[in-house]
Image: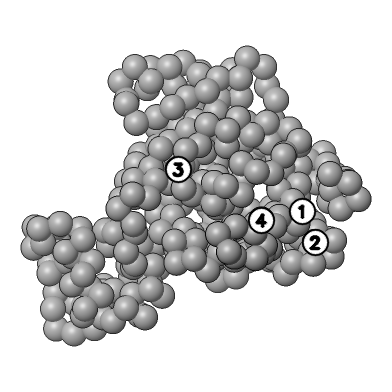
Amino acid sequence: MDVGSLSTSAQSRLADPDGTSAFGPCSRSVLSAGDFASDAERLDWLIATLGEPFCRKLGLFRVPDDLVLSVVIPVYNEKNSIHEILRRVRAVPIRKEIIIVDDCSRDGTREILREMEKSDGDIKVVYHERNQGKGASLRTGFREATGQIVIVQDADLEYDPAQYPELIQPIIEDQADVVYGSRFIGETHRVLYFWHSLANKFLTLLSNAFTDLNLTDMEVCYKVFRREVIQAIELKSDRFGFEPEVTAKVARFTFPARDGRPARKCRIYEIPVSYHGRTYAEGKHIGVKDGFQALWCILRYFLAD
């Protein structure tokens, strides 16, 4: 794992602003790519120098060589951000497959993606012939995923792919089966709408009351799953009802008994994530109607599948 895959806050803890290491007299140049034969060698040096427990807290850990992260990106009218979000996703030094589902964009995004398909060999694009909603796009993307871990990535630059290592760490270390990000437990966020924040917290509280979870941000974009979990769940919501629906079904999910091990409930973790929210003038899609739909979905998926 490359040091560059750390969150901004984690990188700042590795070095002082003047370039001096916070853990000794060595300069940041010691961590430059030219001083090590490979990223693995650099990681080994860091773990040996700082200690494994401290490195784990920073999101520095060994990723299995055969791990593939499936990044599912639902897209609708994001021509202004699609190039940049893909640049940021690609910059994360983890093996991944990038699955983009265009939900019948009409602003030129679809044409951009068709050009990318011709020139870029690392993306798979699925096109919806009519607009169906975020939930429908995610269902399409989840079906296409082949990696061991699947993460949801919005295309609007509100969430930072540099945090992937922290988000997948509990799954890699076999502490979790599903990981939720949270915008409310410690990372930076852009100050925006009070009523949106209040609505998010209310919906999370109501969801928790029905699922008996203690999440702080049920509506967050960053949700990470073992592939066998998300592909075993039947999802039905087409729009933003995906968030409460998948939460209700993950809360009930049970791994069957196998290989001599008893059946067990799905383990869920939360990780703080930064949030750079956008305004409606900047292209934000979710609205009051979606809040009421989320409320209905919380009740619906508590009472019946």
Q: Horizontal and vertical percent for residue 10? A: 37, 69
The kind of secondary structure element at disc 1 is helix
Q: Are marks 3 and 1 in contact (CB under 8 Å)?
A: no
Q: Give the label on residue 211, or none.
A: 2
Q: Horizontal and vertical percent for residue 175? A: 52, 68
In the rendered structure, which amino acid carries the disc numbered 4? Pro
The kind of secondary structure element at disc 3 is loop
User: In the figure, is residue 51 to the left or right of 254?
Assistant: left
The residue under label 3 is: 147
Q: Are marks 3 and 4 in contact (CB under 8 Å)?
A: no
User: In the figure, is residue 55 to the left or right of 194?
Assistant: left
Q: Horizontal and vertical percent for residue 30? A: 12, 69
In the rendered structure, which amino acid carries the disc numbered 1? Ala
Looking at the rendered image, the disc whose residue lies closer to the viewer, 3 or 1, is 3
The residue under label 4 is: 256
Looking at the rendered image, the disc whose residue lies closer to the viewer, 2 or 4, is 4
Mark 4 to mark 1: distance in Å?
18 Å
| Way the structure is coloured | one colour
In the rendered structure, which amino acid carries the disc numbered 2? Thr
The residue under label 1 is: 248
Q: Give the label on residue 187, or none.
A: none
Depth check: give the residue in front, 274 or 246.
Answer: 246
Mark 2 to mark 4: distance in Å?
20 Å
In the rendered structure, which amino acid carries the disc numbered 3? Gly
The kind of secondary structure element at disc 4 is loop
Residue 84 visible, this angle: no
Mark 2 to mark 3: distance in Å?
28 Å
Q: Quadrant of the N terminus?
A: bottom left
Image-quadrant location for residue 206? bottom right
